[in-house]
Image: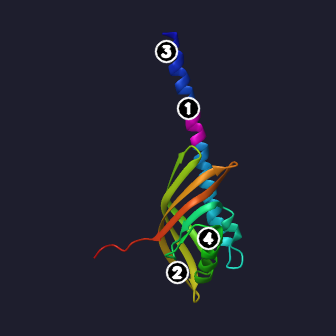
Amino acid sequence: MKRAVCSVLTALLLFGITLAASAGDEADVATAMHMWKENLAVGTAKNPDKILSLYARDAVLWGTISGTIRPTPALIRAYFVNAYKKLPKLTVVFKGPEIRVYGNTAVNTGYYTFSYVKKGKTKTLPARYSFVLVKRGGDWLIVDHHSSGMPKAPK
């Protein structure tokens, strides 16, 4: 009987520790996504390296404004150089993020709206996204990023 009680208490203690770690990791992933938002806004066609610093070397990007999958740092860099040229003064607002943490892997799914300036007018581009991040060396890095424009409602 004592052994069973000890086992249950130990399990509850371990479960509680796991929940606390997960909650902390979820906040860390949210912080990483905030950094992505901030780095996107300060990047330019001449300096996309701020945003690139958040991607792992083995990351893959399937970007919003390109039909080409980008499985290397050079191709991801080229995507952002092009995006900054096509979408000047690019910013993003996240809406409805759903962050789930599974050990050293996290998934963030939701939608966001990009804003940019074209011919002096602010334009928007609503899109949906999925980010997969892994914890490496204490940092959450993006290993997979898919983004696509929001579909139009059927008529």
Residue extending farthest to the left is 155
The three-letter code of the residue at mark 3 reads Ala
Q: Which of 65 and 31 is in front in this view?
A: 65
Spatial separation of the CA atoms under disc 3 and disc 1? 18 Å
Which badge, 3 or 1, is on the more N-terminal residue? 3
Part of the protein shown in magenta: 16-22
Tell me the element at label 1: helix
The three-letter code of the residue at mark 4 reads Ile
Spatial separation of the CA atoms under disc 2 and disc 1? 46 Å
Tag nearer the camera, 1 or 4: 4
Image side of residue 146 versus residue 72, left or right: left
User: Which residue in the structure is indicated by mark 2?
Assistant: 123
Residue 76 disc label: 4
Tell me the element at label 4: helix
Image side of residue 60 versus residue 110, left or right: right
Q: Quadrant of residue 86?
A: bottom right
Confirm or deny contact between disc 2 and disc 1 (CB under 8 A).
no
Spatial separation of the CA atoms under disc 1 and disc 4? 39 Å
- Residue 49, percent across and down? 70, 70
Spatial separation of the CA atoms under disc 4 and disc 2? 24 Å
Confirm or deny contact between disc 2 and disc 3 (CB under 8 A).
no
The three-letter code of the residue at mark 1 reads Gly
Q: In this view, does 2 lie above or below 114?
A: above
Which badge, 4 or 2, is on the more N-terminal residue? 4
Q: Is residue 36 above or below residue 5?
A: below
- Residue 37, percent across and down? 61, 65
Residue 17 sits inside the magenta stretch: yes
User: Which residue in the structure is indicated by mark 1?
Assistant: 16
